[in-house]
């Protein structure tokens, strides 16, 4: 069985420096060198998972195949490595404390006073080691959320300190991501924030092995020497992470900076083969050298925060590269749309994606959007609530039921075309109780969905409580709405479409969660293709 090595990625000075991207880039390079690598994220918040958080709080909630509601950084891990993550890849303080308290109630610590040290730190260490003990991985990269100095991060840093002592220096490596800001007035880069950040780590008993320095300007040899000297790391362990136009350029920047080689040397691992990143470079070339352009509207209620629809935006990047097309995504607040202004606001778009979400805020704007797209033959793609809004719009304006709605928005609707799933009706707790994870879908031959996927059986990831009300299936079918995807286990409608429309499809699942650089999702690829056709026809 393989003995895993452990890499820890910490952050200092400020949040949002990109620990997840650095961790994913390093993992990509190690993977390209022949090492089986996985990444896990430890988040210091007390929520058990981000499933009950508003996207404005924490960005999108990423869902894994096994139904875990996780941090959006797991999306980066999957998009870079092209391998699925799981429940074990994301751990929160809430989950740690919940486990320790459950153990205490069961009597596992009988007679002992339960404390942060050793009980909380022991549970953190156990979680860190879980993936490594499977024997599947050569290297396990653990990203620690938060910033060094945060009170809530202290138990994680202490757990890292203990693990380094227990496992030995050759089996562990600490990478500290920090900021080297540029002061325009002084005309120079400043290393003092980095020095203070490293000092904070050292005071907690952890000496970083490698410093990755985020910067807007190139680090001079003098700056690198100064950082290495005063932060007590080798000169070659000061890595420049300069701002780039796309996150997908970061692995190539890290390769040039030799982050992978320095890490492997620290772990006493050979460099094996030179990494073959030809397909990655091809993807980047197509992404940065498009032959056409489309403008796609993203209609949602969280559009003010870029991370709220992170996976959707990245799926458009993947699909754009395949089609050699620059996908210009225009975010549109659904609350600002209605029947009276939809034509004006949506005119000139080559396609519109109506985004997922919860609650009734902005719902009428989504419905008005879909009405305009359906009547004007503009490519439409609806995800989760976006699909449900398409069903409501069709019921109101084609079937002639103006009061049709979802039970979520109007529990007293006479035409509840979207209903609460049967298995959800007795659920009271909100956390982790939705229909989550990967489920099978059977696709009708000859349908648009069949042409998109090229097969009749697929598996996609879900996150919802409400579903198409099967009591209305016949009425919809008789009036031209096609249910082209059905879950074989419980007959839930997974895909709806309109045959005579150039491209009109809604899906109950979240295809954006399975789109990667190596495997762009076919629904996004075909949607962008349809948008290209629309652009040509103008």
Image: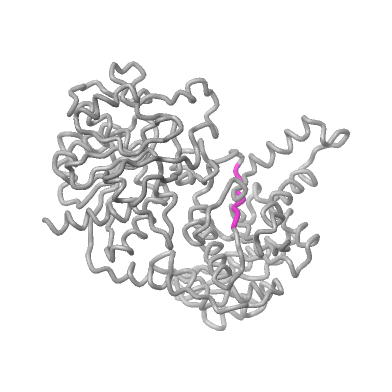
**Percent x, y of residue 472:** 29, 23
**Percent x, y of residue 264:** 65, 73
For the view shown, which residue lies furthest in the bottom direction? 221
Going 24% across and 43% down the picture, which residue do you hit? Answer: 504
Asked whether 405 falls inside the magenta stretch, the response is no
For this view, does 507 lie left or right of residue 191?
left
For the view shown, which residue lies furthest in the front direction? 445
Find the magenta span and give its range: 39-45
Going 73% across and 46% down the picture, which residue do you hit? Answer: 123
Q: Quadrant of the N terminus?
A: bottom right
For this view, does 259 lie left or right of residue 394?
right
For this view, does 510 lie left or right of residue 2?
left
Picture layout, residue 16 above or below residue 308 = below
Q: Nearer the viewer, residue 16 or 500?
A: 500
Q: Quadrant of the C terminus?
A: bottom left
Picture layout, residue 531 above or below residue 262 = above
Decide whether the magenta segment is chiefly helix, strand or loop.
Answer: strand
Residue 532 appearing in the image:
yes
For the view shown, which residue lies furthest in the right direction? 111
Number of numbered callouts drawn: 0
**Percent x, y of residue 367:** 25, 34
Q: Nearer the viewer, residue 216 or 370?
A: 370
Asked whether 44 falls inside the magenta stretch, the response is yes
**Percent x, y of residue 302:** 37, 42
Residue 300 appearing in the image:
no
Q: Nearer the viewer, residue 433 or 61?
A: 433
Picture layout, residue 533 above or below residue 86 = below
Color encoding of the figure: one colour
Residue 109's quadrant in the figure? Answer: top right
Going 38% across and 72% down the picture, which residue do you hit? Answer: 282
């Amino acid at each position: 069985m393989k003995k895993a090595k452990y890499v820890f990625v910490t952050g200092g000075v400020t949040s949002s420096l990109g620990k997840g991207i650095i961790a994913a880039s390093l993992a990509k390079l190690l993977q390209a060198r022949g090492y089986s690598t996985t990444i896990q994220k430890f988040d210091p918040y007390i929520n058990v998972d981000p499933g009950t958080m508003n996207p404005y709080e924490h960005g999108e909630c990423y869902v894994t195949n096994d139904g875990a509601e996780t941090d959006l950084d797991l999306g980066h891990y999957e998009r870079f490595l092209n391998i699925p993550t799981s429940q074990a890849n994301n751990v929160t303080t809430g989950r740690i404390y919940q486990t320790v308290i459950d153990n205490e109630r069961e009597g596992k610590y009988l007679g002992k006073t339960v404390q942060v040290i050793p009980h909380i730190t022991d549970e953190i260490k156990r979680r860190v080691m879980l993936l490594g003990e499977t024997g599947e991985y050569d290297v396990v990269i653990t990203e620690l959320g938060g910033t060094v100095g945060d009170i809530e991060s202290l138990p994680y840093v202490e757990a890292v300190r203990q693990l380094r002592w227990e496992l030995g220096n050759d089996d562990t490596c600490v990478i500290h991501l920090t900021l080297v800001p540029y002061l325009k007035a002084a005309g120079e880069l400043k290393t003092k924030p980095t020095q203070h950040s490293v000092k904070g780590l050292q005071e907690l008993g952890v000496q970083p092995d490698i410093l990755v320095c985020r910067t807007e300007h190139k680090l001079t040899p003098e700056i690198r020497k100064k950082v290495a000297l005063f932060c007590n790391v080798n000169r070659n362990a000061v890595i420049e992470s300069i701002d780039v136009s796309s996150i997908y350029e970061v692995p190539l920047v890290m390769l040039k900076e030799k982050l992978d080689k320095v890490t492997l040397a620290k772990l006493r691992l050979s460099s094996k083969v030179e990494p073959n990143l030809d397909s990655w470079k091809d993807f980047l070339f197509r992404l940065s050298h498009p032959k056409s352009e489309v403008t796609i509207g993203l209609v949602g209620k969280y559009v003010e925060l870029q991370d709220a629809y992170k996976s959707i935006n990245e799926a458009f990047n993947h699909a754009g590269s395949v089609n050699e097309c620059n996908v210009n995504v225009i975010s549109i607040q659904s609350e600002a749309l209605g029947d009276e202004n939809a034509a004006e606001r949506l005119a000139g778009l080559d396609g519109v994606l109506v985004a997922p979400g919860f609650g009734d805020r902005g719902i009428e704007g989504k419905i008005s959007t879909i009405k305009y797209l359906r009547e004007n033959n503009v490519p439409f793609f609806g995800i989760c609530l976006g699909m449900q809004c398409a069903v409501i719009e069709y019921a109101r304006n084609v079937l002639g039921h103006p009061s049709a709605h979802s039970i979520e928005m109007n529990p007293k609707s006479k035409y509840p075309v979207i209903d609460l799933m049967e298995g959800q009706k007795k659920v009271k707790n909100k956390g982790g109780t939705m229909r989550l994870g990967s489920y099978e879908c059977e696709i009708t031959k000859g349908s648009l969905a069949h042409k998109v996927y090229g097969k009749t059986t697929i598996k996609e990831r879900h996150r919802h409580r409400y579903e198409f009300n099967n009591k209305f299936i016949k009425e919809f079918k008789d009036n031209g709405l096609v249910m082209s995807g059905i879950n074989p286990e419980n007959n839930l409608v997974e895909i709806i479409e309109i045959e005579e429309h150039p491209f009109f499809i809604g899906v109950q699942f979240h295809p954006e969660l399975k789109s990667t650089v190596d495997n762009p999702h076919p629904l996004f690829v075909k949607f962008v293709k349809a948008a290209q056709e629309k652009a040509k026809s103008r």
